Image (cartoon, rainbow, N blue to C red):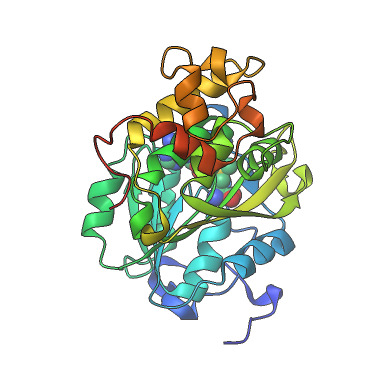
């Protein structure tokens, strides 16, 4: 499908809403005029069409895919996603925006769920989703990003990929390799389950209102379940949290409540080492020093 010229993009009256893949591509300017961005919902709306197209090009949505958008806001990404994939399921906490979004799309284009992504039952949603593999997308509010990323780990086995816009500093922590300044709990917990790539930065000026900080786009692809080590999920999280809780201490000291120096050495790890020098596999070995209670394999 060829992209219509931008001048051809206009707001559709409800009776002539575009359907599915016939909808115009990036349609900036079609915003809710009287809406004041709500700080408590982290509302910084994308308005730069080149940035929107670049993000959606990176996602490369195809018709029939199970696209899920968290926080559609004023539909900057949603329009382009619907235009390419035909249908999007979106979750929006802001009641006013949810009501407006319903006027912008047909039910065939948008399934809108009004609610809080942090309180949402992702496992039930994934179980009931018609698409076998979900593609999750979002320009995420900074205050919910870490808990939401952890909540989504529970449905990683049903996800093909996740593309998120986050604070640049958070993305740096997510993709950081061992030994780097930003490597920490978030890096280990997410790299255990996903292959991750930082794609590109988005400047503050691409948003209205502009946020305080630069943003980055990250791609997260769940590792195949067969490649995951069989390890007790709770124990793994406990070891990683304890190891980084006292970052400057040696592992021997940081993990003293969980493992003694002999057990650390038996896992093939130097008890005098610090958490930031260990790869994900070494944390797995430390967590395996206890018998598994349940498995991360699903
Ligand atoms: N996707 C739009 C864009 O790129 O312009 C809006 C992005 S704005 C940074 C974040 C959006 O997430 C807002 O629409 C906000 O209302 C919504 N939001 C904030 N917290 C949320 C939550 N807990 N659950 C669902 N949506 C949330």
Q: Residue at x 69, y 41 (%)?
A: 172
Residue 287 location (% of width, % of height) = 41, 32
Q: Quadrant of residue 34?
A: top right
Above or below, 148 relative to 263: below
Q: Nearer the viewer, residue 295 or 262?
A: 262
Residue sitting at x 40%, y 49%: 229
Which image quarter is the N terminus in? bottom right
Q: Report the number of numbered marks.
A: 0
Q: Quadrant of residue 181?
A: top right
- Estimate the x, y position of residue 5 in percent, counting from the top left: 69, 79
Q: Is residue 264 above or below residue 202?
A: above
Residue sitting nearer the eye, 260 or 8: 260
Viewer can see residue 233: yes
- Residue 139 in the image: state x and y as whole percent: 57, 48
Res 169 → quadrant: top right
Question: Which residue is drawn at the image coordinates 64% and 60% (left, top)?
Answer: 28
Q: Position of residue 269 (x, y in %)?
A: 56, 32
In the rendered view, does 14 fall on the left or right side of 219? left
Report the residue at 45% width, 39% height from top. Answer: 284
Relative to residue 281, is residue 239 depicted above or below?
above
Residue 35 appearing in the image: no
Observer-nearest residue: 131 or 63? 131
Depth check: give the residue in front, 40 or 124. Answer: 124
């Amino acid at each position: 499908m060829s992209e219509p010229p931008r001048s051809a993009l206009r707001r559709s009256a409800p009776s002539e809403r575009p359907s599915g893949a016939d909808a115009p591509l990036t349609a900036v300017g079609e915003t809710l005029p009287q809406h004041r961005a709500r700080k408590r919902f982290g509302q910084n709306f994308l308005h730069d069409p080149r940035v929107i197209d670049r993000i959606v090009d990176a996602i490369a949505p195809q018709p029939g895919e199970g696209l899920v958008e968290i926080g559609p806001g004023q539909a900057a990404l949603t329009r382009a996603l619907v235009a390419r994939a035909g249908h999007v399921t979106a979750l929006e906490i802001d009641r006013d925006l949810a009501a407006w979004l319903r006027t912008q799309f047909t039910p065939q284009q948008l399934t809108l769920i009004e609610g809080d992504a942090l309180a949402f039952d992702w496992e039930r949603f994934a179980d009931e989703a018609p698409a076998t593999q979900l593609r999750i997308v979002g320009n995420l509010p900074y205050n919910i990003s870490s808990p939401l990323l952890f909540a989504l780990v529970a449905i990683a086995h049903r996800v093909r990929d996740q593309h998120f816009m986050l604070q640049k500093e958070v993305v740096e922590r997510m993709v950081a390799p061992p030994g780097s300044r930003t490597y920490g709990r978030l890096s280990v917990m997410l790299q255990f389950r996903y292959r991750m790539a930082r794609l590109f930065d988005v400047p503050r000026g691409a948003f209205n209102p502009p946020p305080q900080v630069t943003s980055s786009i990250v791609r997260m692809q769940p590792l195949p379940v067969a490649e995951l080590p069989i390890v007790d999920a709770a124990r793994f999280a406990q070891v990683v949290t304890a190891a980084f809780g006292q970052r400057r201490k040696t592992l021997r000291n940081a993990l003293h409540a969980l493992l003694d120096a002999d057990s650390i050495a038996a896992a093939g790890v130097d008890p005098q080492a610090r958490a930031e020098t260990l790869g994900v596999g070494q944390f797995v070995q430390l967590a395996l020093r206890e018998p598994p209670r349940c498995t991360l394999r699903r």
